[in-house]
Image (cartoon, helix red, strand yellow):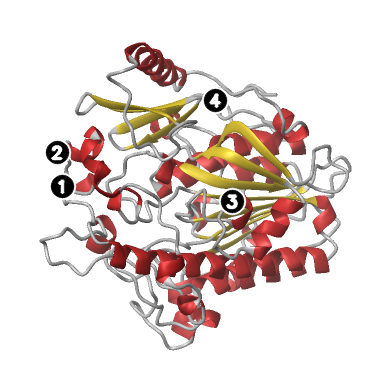
């Protein structure tokens, strides 16, 4: 029986606004696909020689791949809120940021809107913004009711804890690591107990496809599908759990080099991951990475189903498709797994960003773009393409100029925030700083892409310049922003 709190069909159109008349000069349809914890280098089109992501690779072949895209925050919830608003996490509280801000502008422009999956929206907060809402939350203590667990799984006789993501709140916060002497079993990774057809990944794709099939093609649409994979605990369903052999996985470098990184060795409170030693054994890391790769391929399969539905319904040529992630995963780098300690190194801060353009839109297809961009840039860019006003004070930049000319060399710095840490990436350098401990690290990311050698003592002038950039950014977070880059 459908829970009493869930509106029939999870459709809000009846309680929002009446039918919206088609807009003659409306911009393109938008399909925004976000993954959870997908590393920038775990997509075939981004250079990974082992992972199998045919759907994302095909999208990249017909679109634009951004090699230097950064999240606004390595905290997933903050990253999704900033993506929706174009506002930096540090500025959100002071500005009364509304998570539905991106969708509201499109809805008022005449777009039909849908938010499906792990979205920072609730039914009470969607008035005037979202026509259709289907929610799934991680199955941890304190989880609010959602459509997937309390509707779909309950209708199949499966209760709380039956999914793969029921490790508990403490399980999510603890570092999934193993020290040489602490006796722990290593990263929490195991095949999912549920079959593929009952997984939340398939459920999200099913509802996205169903919504597209029922959509009136005379109206433009904005559909956001927010997947929970490949987040830990790494638990893909069969056959994806056996798709990769651990010995074949190319682990990122690091090993014991973490000991030379001040931000991994300073005292940390429990919220930042405690002071546990990183994992010293390669075997458990490889097994976790193999299952992580399986999750990525599982995600790719279901994203491909949505893209195929766009083609089948005759909507692809009118739709801009964006695929990105909230943040990355250490995946063995520095001997760590998952996201703890949550320091915004590129392992966590750099994300994949693939843009598939509608037919007739200027832009080089199959291009690989080196320009620095942020996930905060997605909102103002889409708004510009659709003739929608971005929310006041949005700090993301309209990067339509980069879409038109992916070979542009213009690189404005990008910023990442999380907890006690701030990071700035310029064209050559990356500086990570914690005001809590007055510690900072500087990397030449062109020569040292895995951020192994801290240059802060060798290049004090570069450190000073980048700390100045962070200060300017902190000031700008209280000002109006949003200029076109290109």
Alpha carbon of mark 1 to alpha carbon of mark 2: how far?
6 Å
Alpha carbon of mark 4 to alpha carbon of mark 1: how far?
38 Å
SS type, badge 1: loop
In the shown orientation, is residue 101 left or right of residue 407?
A: left
In the shown orientation, is residue 179 left or right of residue 287?
A: left
Q: Could you tell which of marks 4 and 2 lies nearer the N-terminus?
A: 2
Residues at badges 1 and 2 in contact (C-beta under 8 Å)?
Answer: yes
Alpha carbon of mark 3 to alpha carbon of mark 4: how far?
36 Å
Alpha carbon of mark 3 to alpha carbon of mark 1: how far?
34 Å
Alpha carbon of mark 3 to alpha carbon of mark 2: how far?
36 Å
Q: Could you tell which of marks 3 and 4 lies nearer the N-terminus?
A: 3
Q: Nearer the viewer, mark 3 or mark 1?
A: 3
How crowded pointer 3 is (Cα within 10 Å; few <14, some 14-19, many 20+) is rated as: few
Write down the residue under mark 4: 393
Q: Nearer the viewer, mark 4 or mark 1?
A: 1
Q: Position of residue 74 (x, y in %)?
A: 40, 43
Write down the residue under mark 2: 267
Q: Nearer the viewer, mark 3 or mark 4?
A: 3
Please tell me whether residue 410 is drawn above or below residue 246 in the rendered image: above
Mark linked to residue 275: 1
SS type, badge 3: loop
How crowded pointer 2 is (Cα within 10 Å; few <14, some 14-19, many 20+) is rated as: few
Using the rendered image of the protein, determine whether residue 233 is visible from the camera's viewpoint. Answer: no
Please tell me whether residue 173 is drawn above or below residue 196 in the rendered image: above
How crowded pointer 4 is (Cα within 10 Å; few <14, some 14-19, many 20+) is rated as: many
Of residue 484 and residue 479, the one placed in the foreground of this image is 484
Q: Could you tell which of marks 3 and 1 lies nearer the N-terminus?
A: 3
């Amino acid at each position: 029986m459908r829970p009493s709190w869930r509106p029939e069909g999870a459709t809000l159109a009846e309680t929002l606004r009446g039918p919206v008349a088609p807009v003659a000069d409306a911009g393109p349809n938008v399909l925004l696909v976000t993954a959870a914890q997908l590393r920038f280098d775990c997509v075939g089109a981004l250079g990974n020689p082992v992972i199998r992501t045919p759907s994302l690779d095909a999208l990249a072949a017909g679109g634009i791949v951004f090699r230097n895209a950064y999240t606004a925050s390595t905290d997933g919830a903050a990253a999704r809120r900033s993506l929706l608003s174009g506002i930096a996490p540090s500025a959100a509280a002071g500005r009364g940021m509304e998570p539905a801000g991106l969708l509201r502008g499109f809805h008022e422009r005449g777009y039909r809107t849908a938010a499906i999956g792990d979205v920072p929206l609730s039914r009470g907060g969607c008035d005037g913004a979202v026509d259709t809402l289907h929610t799934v939350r991680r199955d941890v203590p304190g989880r609010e009711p959602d459509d997937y667990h309390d509707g779909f799984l309950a209708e199949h006789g499966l209760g709380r804890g039956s999914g793969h993501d029921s490790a508990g709140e403490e399980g999510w916060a603890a570092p999934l690591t193993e020290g040489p002497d602490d006796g722990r079993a290593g990263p929490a990774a195991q095949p999912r107990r549920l079959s593929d057809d009952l997984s939340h990944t398939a459920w999200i794709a099913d509802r996205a496809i169903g919504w597209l099939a029922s959509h009136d093609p005379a109206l433009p649409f904005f559909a956001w599908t927010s997947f929970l994979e490949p987040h830990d605990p790494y638990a893909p369903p069969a056959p994806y759990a056996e798709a990769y052999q651990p010995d074949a996985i190319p682990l990122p470098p690091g090993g014991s080099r973490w000991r030379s990184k001040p931000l991994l060795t300073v005292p940390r409170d429990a919220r930042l991951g405690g002071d546990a030693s990183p994992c010293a054994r390669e075997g458990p890391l490889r097994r976790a990475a193999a299952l992580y790769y399986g999750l990525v391929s599982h995600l790719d399969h279901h994203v491909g189903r949505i893209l195929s539905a766009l083609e089948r319904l005759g909507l692809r040529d009118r739709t801009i498709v964006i695929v990105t992630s909230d943040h990355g995963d250490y995946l063995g780098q520095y001997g760590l797994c998952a996201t703890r300690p949550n320091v915004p190194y590129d392992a966590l801060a750099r994300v994949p960003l693939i843009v598939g353009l509608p037919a007739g839109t200027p832009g080089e297809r199959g291009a690989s773009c080196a320009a620095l961009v942020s996930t905060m840039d997605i909102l103002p860019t889409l708004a510009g393409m659709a003739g929608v006003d971005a929310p006041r004070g949005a700090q993301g930049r309209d990067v339509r100029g980069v879409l038109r000319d992916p070979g542009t060399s213009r690189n404005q710095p990008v910023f990442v925030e999380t907890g006690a840490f701030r990071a700035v990436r310029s064209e050559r350098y990356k500086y990570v700083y914690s005001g809590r401990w007055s510690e900072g690290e500087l990397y030449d990311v062109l020569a040292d892409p895995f951020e192994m050698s801290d240059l802060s003592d060798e290049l004090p002038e570069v450190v000073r310049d980048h700390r100045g950039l962070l200060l300017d950014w902190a000031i700008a977070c209280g000002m109006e922003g949003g200029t076109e880059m290109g």
